Image: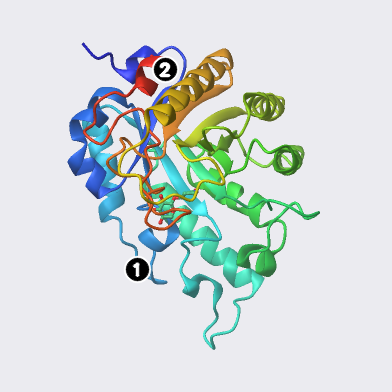
């Protein structure tokens, strides 16, 4: 018989899946059996919840919360402040130019307060700010409309507003390329400076969009150690393991090769033994999907290419990767 993933790791960390309405309906049994945390893949992003200034659309978010409650699962909130999937109106004034700092901060506060208050008690952790750090070059922060209009303190403000709305929620800074040494150091210095300013931040989210060769286990270990040294919780927030190496642009595969599945299983085994080793710090591990039937990596970054990044295959059956993790 097939063990339950979240029961296997019950003394270490939560096991989560990112879901959308299609996954919630289509993978119901798989979700209920193996996962005890859910994240909305898109449905709690700014553009989904707040498409116009005085209009909120909570239907899909509410449905996810109801599903989680019905099955005794926790929910991670994703995400309050991000440069993507945020509607244009947020950054504009009545004449169509850029909003000023005071207006943008007032909108940020209103949005955060409304959303975090609605789900108070139902969401154990929020990705308050997503992907604010630049991938390369000397700047710590990436250029964005939040940064350009508000200035560096848009991050601290977002955490303060979220904390005021729900003092019990764990507040996270979340990013990708989190294990690349150059970017790791920037994320570290950003979060360190937030801590020094006594900003209410409780954790670092490692997105963990990884593949068959990168990042190396050494780099992942170093990233975990570095972030953990700040005395914060770590959540793995968007784990998937692409079966393609970086230079592989093939679009003709209709199923993964056995070499790919073996290598993936080996990688997953290493990742989870590392997470176990650091389970004093790593308190939640979320996959960016549930099974290989659907992943956001289908068509990204190579158009027309299917991917198979999870522990369960397209029929929801356990893969070699699952058995290695167990
Ligand atoms: C992705 C979703 O999976 C896609 O459906 C959407 O089109 C784009 O966003 N980092 C994040 C997530 O923080 O919100 C992104 O989700 C994947 C990368």
Judging depth in this view, the residue of 270 and 41 nearest the camera is 270
Measured as percent of width and height from the top left, residue 42 is found at: 38, 52
Colouring rule applied to residues: rainbow
Rounded to the nearest angstrom, the CA distance separating label 2 from label 1 is 44 Å
> What is the total number of numbered labels drawn onto the structure image?
2
Quarter-wise, where is residue 192 in the image?
top right
Q: Is residue 39 left or right of residue 237?
A: left
Q: Which residue is mark 1?
A: 55
Q: Which mark is residue 325?
A: 2
Q: Position of residue 19 (x, y in %)?
A: 32, 43
Instruction: Give x and y (percent) for residue 143.
Output: 68, 63
Residue sitting nearer the eye, 102 or 37: 37
For residue 168, say whether it is visible.
Answer: no
Seen in the picture, residue 130 relative to 56 is either above or below; the reply is above
Of badges 2 and 1, the one in the foreground is: 2
Give SS at disc 2.
Answer: helix
Judge the density around disc 1: few (<14), some (14-19), many (≥20) Cα neighbours within 10 Å. Answer: few
Question: The C terminus lies in which quarter of the figure?
Answer: top left
Q: Are marks 2 and 1 in contact (CB under 8 Å)?
A: no
Residue drawn 27% across the image and 52% down it: 60
Quadrant in the picture for the N terminus: top left
Q: Secondary structure at mark 1?
A: loop
């Amino acid at each position: 018989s097939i063990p339950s993933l979240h029961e296997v790791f019950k003394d270490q960390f939560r096991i989560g899946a990112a879901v959308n309405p299609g996954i919630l309906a289509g993978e119901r049994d798989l979700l209920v059996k193996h996962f005890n945390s859910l994240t909305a893949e898109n449905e709690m992003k700014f553009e989904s919840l707040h498409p116009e200034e005085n209009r909120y659309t909570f239907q899909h978010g509410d449905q996810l919360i109801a599903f989680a409650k019905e099955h005794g699962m926790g929910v991670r909130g994703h995400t309050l402040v991000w440069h993507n999937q945020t509607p244009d109106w947020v950054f504009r004034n009545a004449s169509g130019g850029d909003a000023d700092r005071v207006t943008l901060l007032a909108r940020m506060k209103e949005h955060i307060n409304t959303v975090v208050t609605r789900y108070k008690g139902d969401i154990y952790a929020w990705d308050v700010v997503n992907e604010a750090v630049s991938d390369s070059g000397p700047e710590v922060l990436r250029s964005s409309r939040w940064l350009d209009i508000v200035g560096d303190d848009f991050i601290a403000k977002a955490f303060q507003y979220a904390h005021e709305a729900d003092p019990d929620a764990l507040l996270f800074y979340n990013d990708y390329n989190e294990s690349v040494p150059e970017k790791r150091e920037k994320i570290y210095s950003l979060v360190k400076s937030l801590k020094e300013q006594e900003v209410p931040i409780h954790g670092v989210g490692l997105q963990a969009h990884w593949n068959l060769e990168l990042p190396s286990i050494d780099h992942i270990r170093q990233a975990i150690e570095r972030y953990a040294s700040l005395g914060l919780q770590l959540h793995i927030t968007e784990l998937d393991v692409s079966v393609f190496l970086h230079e592989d642009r093939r679009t003709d595969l209709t199923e993964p090769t056995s070499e790919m599945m073996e290598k993936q299983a080996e990688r997953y085994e290493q990742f989870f033994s590392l997470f176990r080793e650091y389970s004093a710090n790593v308190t939640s591990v979320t996959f960016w999907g549930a099974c290989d039937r659907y992943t956001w990596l289908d068509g990204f970054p190579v158009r027309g290419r299917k991917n198979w990044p999870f522990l369960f295959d397209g029929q929801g059956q356990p893969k070699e990767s699952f058995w290695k993790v167990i």
